[in-house]
Amino acid sequence: MQNHTLPWLFVLLTMGLLPSVHADEQKPETSAAAAGMRAYVDPATGKLVSQPVTAEQQRQATASDPAFSQDSSDLRVVQMPDGSTMMDLQGRFQQATVAAKQADGSLSTYCNDADHRSLGQHQHEAAGTAQPTPATTREQR
């Protein structure tokens, strides 16, 4: 009498391993505009630049990006149990910042989003130096 257990054991083990063999081949889903940095290559110099140079780069840069949307019409304020309020911005109200290396080797940063693009290179008050305006009523918080 032949032992048929060994082939069945092999089949069961192989079936159990199949999902793990292909698990690392699946690519995670990412959106076209995932969080991160955006840089452009100047075709004339081959250097990375902060502003679009080619027509294609300009088209992509001026395309409406929902991450930079300032529309709050469908957002709602939620009152938390401790009395504080919260609003889920749903990935909107993002800010873009450019870091530029200066001639002396230092770095300067400036906004480069749709609202600030017309201002060009500019500075904001350093973090921690601006004095907050206290809220006087619950609605202002």
Image (cartoon, rainbow, N blue to C red):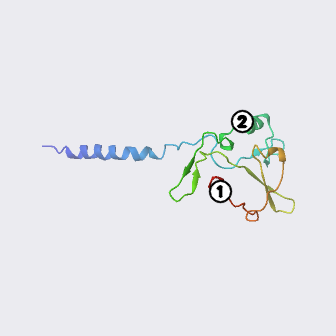
Single out the residue that lies furthest toward the front: 137
Identify the residue at horizontal 80%, vertical 43% (top origin).
Answer: 42
**Left or right of 61 on screen, residue 72:** left
Which is more toward the observer, 10 or 20? Answer: 20
Q: CA distance from mark 2 to mark 1?
A: 39 Å
Where disc 1 sits, the SS reads loop
- Quarter holding the N terminus? top left
Where disc 2 sits, the SS reads loop
Going by the numbered disc 1, the residue's amino acid type is Thr
Going by the numbered disc 2, the residue's amino acid type is Ala
Identify the residue at horizontal 70%, vertical 36% (top origin).
Answer: 64
Does 8 appear above or below 99?
Answer: above
Category of crowding for the residue at label 1, using alpha-carbon neighbours closer than 10 angstroms: few (below 14), some (14–19), many (at least 20)? few
Which is more toward the observer, 105 or 138? Answer: 138
Does 8 appear above or below 135?
Answer: above
Snapshot quadrant of residue 54: top right
Which is more toward the observer, 7 or 64? Answer: 64
Q: How many labels were placed on the picture? A: 2
Does 100 appear above or below 114?
Answer: below
Q: Which residue is mark 2?
A: 63
**Left or right of 83 on screen, residue 44:** right
Does 105 appear above or below 20?
Answer: below
Identify the residue at horizontal 31%, vertical 47% (top origin).
Answer: 13
Q: Which mark is residue 137?
A: 1
Single out the residue that lies furthest toward the right: 103
Which is more toward the observer, 102 or 68? Answer: 68
Snapshot quadrant of residue 141: bottom right
